[in-house]
Image: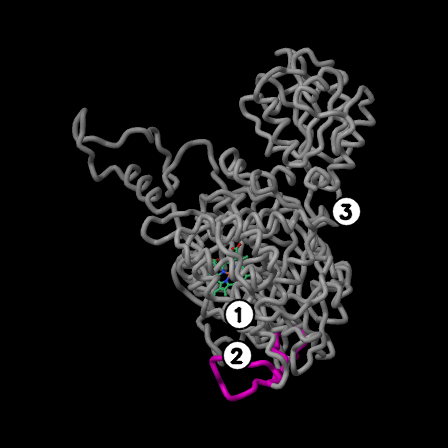
Amino acid sequence: MTDTKPDETGSTCPPPGPALDQREPEYRSPTGEPVNAEPGARGPRGEALTTSQGVVMSDTDHALKAGPRGPLLVQDFHFREKITHFDHERIPERVVHARGAGAHGVFRANGAAAELTRAKFLRAEVETPVFVRFSTVAGSRGSADTVRDTRGFATKFYTDEGVYDLVGNNIPVFFIQEAIKFPDVIHAAKPHPDREIPQAQTAHDTFWDFVTLHTEATAHTFWSMSDRALPRSFRMMEGFGIHTFRLVNDAGNTTLVKFHWKPRLGVHSMLWEETQLTGGFDPDFHRRDLADAIEAGAFPEWDLGVQVFPDSPEQTFEGIDLLDPTKIVPEELAPVQIIGTLQLNANPVNFFAETEQIAFCPDHLVPGIEPSDDPLLQGRLFSYLDTQLTRLGGPNFTQLPINRPHAPVNDNFRDGMHQTGVHPGINAYKPNSTGGGCPFTALTADRAYVESPTPIAPPARKVRMSANTDAPVSFSDHYSQPRMFYRSLTPVEQRHLGEAFAFELGKCEDETIRERGVQMVAEVDTDLAGFVATQLGLPVPQPKSTVVELAPSPALSQLRGAFPVDGRKVAIVVDDAVDTSMLDDLVRYFQRAATSPMVVAPHAGKLNHQSGIAIDRSFATMRSVEFDAAVFLTAASDHRVDLLIGEMWRHGKPLAAAGAGEEAMKRNGIAGDQAGAYLGEDLERISNGLVDALGEHRVWARFS
Ligand code: HEM
C-alpha cells in the first residue's frame, strides 16, 4: 500500500487504483494460489501433475508419437513445454562470487550508533529482517567450498526505510585501489582462458604474474596466504565493509566509519591439508556446516561494530588514508564499537529462488549512510546493478521475492522483462496533473535520502593524489602494512603463511614469476623471504624499498583464547560391544555442551542392529576433516580408525578415550600425558578436558 502524504498545498495521494472500466488480473502466485496465502503457497499446489497452464496430465514419461515407434509429433504441447522450460533453467552465474550459501536472520540494533546516523534500523531495540550470503570469489558455482580464497560476506537488511546492503568480505583489505582494475585482477585470478584450469585457486602463473607486477596487491596477497583464506566455517569468519562510509546523524553532522562483523564463535581456520582433504571428501563443507548448524538450532551470531573517525577534509586517520581500501586502521588505534547483533536463524526454502537470485549492491543505502569517495567503492556503485541486468534478465529483478524491499515502493518504473506488477493509472511520470501530482517527493528531509553536501575538489584527474600533497603519500606505500600484518601473527600463523607462499609460487611454471614472488615477500620480511626462497630453491633477494616500521596489531591474530563451541562436531567412535547407557550419557553430555555429537561405528544403521542408537557415520563414510574432536570407546583394529586418529592428531584436534578406546590411542603412540589427549575411565573428566580444548579450536601446543 502506498501511504498518503500531504503535498505543499495540503492535498494527498490516494492509493492508486484501476479506473471503473478496468479490472486487473486476479492476484495469484505463479502456482495459482492467492499471493497472501500461508508461507509455502508459492510452491507446487494440487494433487495432480499439471502443465504450467494448470492442465492435469496423465503421462509425463512418453511423448506423442506418429506410430508405435515414433517419430514425435510437434503437437505434444506437454513434451515441448517441459523440455523448453528445462532448456532455460540456468541463469548466468555471478561473474565473481559465483559459489555461495545463504541464510535468513534478524539484526537487532543496540542504539550505540543513534548518535552517529539517522538510519532508523540502527536505533535501540529495532529489529530488522536480513538475508546473508557467504561466498568464495574465484571459483565457479559448482566449485569446492574449502579453497584458498577471500570469502564474501554480504548482508541485505530489509529496513522500514528501504533495503540496505553491506557487501563485504572476510578480509579487511582489497587487491586494488581503483575499481577500473577489477577486471584485471579477476582475469588474473580466474582459470587460464585456454584450458580453463586451475579452478577456484590462485596457485597459478597469471595470478602471481599480476600481483607481483602490481605491488598495491601485496597487502591482500599476504592476507590471502594467511589462515584467513581457509575459514573453518562461515560461522567463524569476521566480516569487513572494507571501504570507509559516511554516517549522517539527525543534526546533519557526519562521521567516517568502517564496518566490522565480529563472530561470537571466534575466528577459526582450517589447516591447508584439511582443506585439501575436504575438497574431495565434502566439497559442500561450508554450505552444509551453515545449514546444519541452523537446523540444529545453533544459530550463528555476529556483532556489528564500527570504527569511527572524524570527517576531516583530509579523510585520514593517524596518517592512514581512509579512502585507501588496501589499508586497515588497527583496532588498537580505533576500537570497534558494537552497534548491534546479527543472528542467522532460518535456512532458505529454495536455493535458486533465494540464494541464487538475491542481488546485493553497494548502492542500496538508506538515509544516514553514504558512500565515501574511495575510488574502489565508487566503481562498485556502478558495477553491481549493471551486472544484475544480465544475470537476472532485465530491470525487474527487484520484484523477486528475495529482493523485494519490505518498505512500500512507488518508483514510477514501468514495464520491462519479467514485469510482475500491475500498475494502475496513467501517470508514471513527474510532474503530472493527471495523477494529482502523485507520487510526491518527501516534503522534508526526515524520511528522504538526501546526500549530505560534500565538497568535490577540482580539477578532475586520473592519478590519485594524497589529500595534502606535502604529506607522505600513504596510497603508494604498499609494504608497511603487510609487514605489520605479518608481524602481528603468532609463530604458527606465520609458518602457515610462509608455507602458503611456498606452495602457491611453487605451482607457478614461469621461473621469473616465482622470483618476483620471492622479491615481493622480501620487501615485507627478509626472514620470511629466506624461508620461501629456500623452499623454491631460489637465492634470497634483498628488499629494494624501505618500509615504515608500524606497531604490531595483536587484534589481527586469530589465536586469541577460548570461544564457544556451539555446533562443533565431536565423533564418538564405538562398536557394537559398546555399553549403550555410557554412550547415551556421553551423547547427552556433548549436546548439553552445545556441540554436535556424531556416533561413528563400523557399519551404518543402528548399533547392534536393534538398539535405539542410530549411527551417524560408518567407517566407510567418515573422514577426520568432518570432526573437531573425537572420543574413542572402541579398540577396533581397522586402518580407517588409525587414519582417523593419525589425521586428527596431526591437525591438532583434541582426542579422548575410555575403556577399549585407550588401546586404539596407545596403538597410535598417544599417551594420556600429551597435549590435548584425555585418556581414562572418568568420563566426565575426559569430556570436560575435550570441550575446554575445543574452545581454543586446536591444541596449539602440538604445533610448536
Ligand atoms: C572492497 C571491495 C569489494 C568487496 C568487499 C566485494 C564484495 C563482493 C561480494 C560479497 C559479492 C557477492 C555478493 C553476493 O553474495 O551475491 C560481490 C559480487 C560482485 N562484485 Fe564485488 N566486491 C568488491 C569489489 C568489487 C569491484 C571493485 C567490482 C567492480 C568494479 C565488483 C564487482 C562485483 C560484481 C560484478 C559482483 C557480482 C554481483 C552479482 O552478480 O550479483 N566488486 N562482491
Per the rendering, the mark at residue 561 is 3
Amino acid type, mark 1: Gln
Q: Can residue 3 be spotted in the picture?
A: no
Q: Is residue 106 left or right of residue 361?
A: right
* SS of the residue under disc 1: loop
User: Which residue bears the numbered disc 1?
Assistant: 177
User: Which residue bears the numbered disc 2?
Assistant: 464
| Quarter of image, res 551 | bottom right
Amino acid type, mark 3: Gly
Q: Main secondary structure of the magenta part?
A: loop
User: Does the closest atom of ligand 1 sit within 8 Å of the Cβ of label 1?
Assistant: no
In the rendered image, residue 517, in percent from the top left (x then y), is placed at 49, 58
Q: Is residue 511 left or right of residue 256?
A: left
Q: Is residue 445 magenta?
A: yes
In the rendered image, residue 461, in percent from the top left (x then y), is placed at 48, 83
In the rendered image, residue 49, in percent from the top left (x then y), is placed at 40, 33
